[in-house]
Amino acid sequence: MAGSDFHSGKRSGLRIESVSFAYNHSRVLCDIDLEVRQGEFLTLLGPSGSGKTTLLRLLAGMEIPSSGRILLNSVQIDGPGTDRGMVFQSYMLFPWMTLQENIDLAISRTNGHLKKKERYVLADEYLTLVGLQRAARLYPFELSGGMQQRGAIARILALGSPYLLMDEPFGALDPVNRVRLQDLLIGVWEHASPARTVVFVTHDVDEALYLGDRVVVLGSTPGRIIAEVPIDLPRPRARQTYFSNRRINELRNVIVEHYQSDVIEQLESAERIGGNGQGI
């Protein structure tokens, strides 16, 4: 299959070509060029204001680039689609539906030919996958934050999307639940068949290093890529020893240096503008 794509001129995966985005004449993203390989777990790291969420919304088709284009398997993205499922930081479950009904709604979009009873059986399988088999008939308000987010992940998996776009999905959780869901997500991704591609937005350096095959670092004002850092360590990764690994500490220092250089560059740029009488 990969060979036929090559000879036909088609390329698998997500490709961002010279993408810029402005909102109310203010540049949010500038000249983004990036390829997300099929089956890759890519973490998108950057400070607040670097356009991480905007870039994810562009990938989801919720926004359209001001210039440039985004291709999925060589076809330009011009709107949302079930081939790209998005998980938000807020849990986005429908409060008037049970957890099982929320999952069933996703299944019905791609497997509407199934009878309701069959869809419920399938929904329960996805809930079991994320450890929520006993919560199927509960409503979102009866669940903890961590359980709600597991439900949101189960719903996206049930949608069958080969591309998962995740916008700081664990950012609002306490440290223990955050670690649990990181490990859950990695386990689901590693064993998914067919393989899923993940683009995961975070502002946490350690989260990016632990989850990703590659870390793409964005600088701010406007958002642009300032580094791409491959995580050349095998999986599965043992959390107990991972962050004491010398290579991980080297990569963390590389990312921090890029951050610091970008901040200094922004400060010097602001001072130059200020010196011309155009500053604050």
Image (spheres, rainbow, N blue to C red):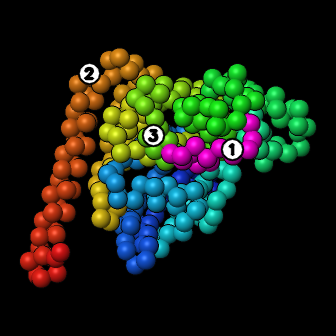
Task: Bin the neighbour count of mark 2 within 10 Å (Cα to Cα): few under 14, some 14-19, many 20 and up.
Answer: few
Part of the protein shown in magenta:
85-99
In terms of image quadrants, where is residue 210? Answer: top left
Residue 244 circle label: 2
Which numbered disc flags the more N-terminal residue, 3 or 1? Answer: 1
Residue 239 is at least partly visible in this image: yes
Residue type, label 2: Ser
Looking at the image, residue 241 lies above or below residue 251: above
Residue 95 numbered mark, or none: 1
Lower position in the chain sequence, tag 1 or tag 2: 1
Q: Residues within 10 Å of mark 1 (few under 14, many from 20)?
A: few
Extreme residue in the front direction: 141
Q: Is residue 110 left or right of residue 131?
A: right
Numbered mark located on residue 276 in the image: none
Does the magenta run of residues contain 48?
Answer: no
Going 19% across and 45% down the picture, which residue do you hit? Answer: 257
Q: Which mark is residue 172?
A: 3
Secondary-structure class at tag 3: loop
Which quadrant holds the N terminus?
top right
Local packing at callout 3 (Cα closer than 10 Å; few below 14, some 14-19, many 20+) is: some
Q: Residue at x 18, y 50 (%)?
A: 260
- Amino acid at pointer 1: Pro
x then y, percent, for residue 184: 53, 26
* Tag 1 secondary structure: loop
Residue 126 drawn above or below residue 49? above
Q: Residue at the far bottom: name it.
A: 277
Measure the alpha-carbon separation of dots 3 and 1.
Answer: 19 Å
Disc 2 versus disc 3: nearer the observer: 3
Residue 195 in sight from this viewpoint: no
- Look at 16% across and 76% down and name the residue there: 279
Q: Position of residue 231 (x, y in %)?
A: 35, 35
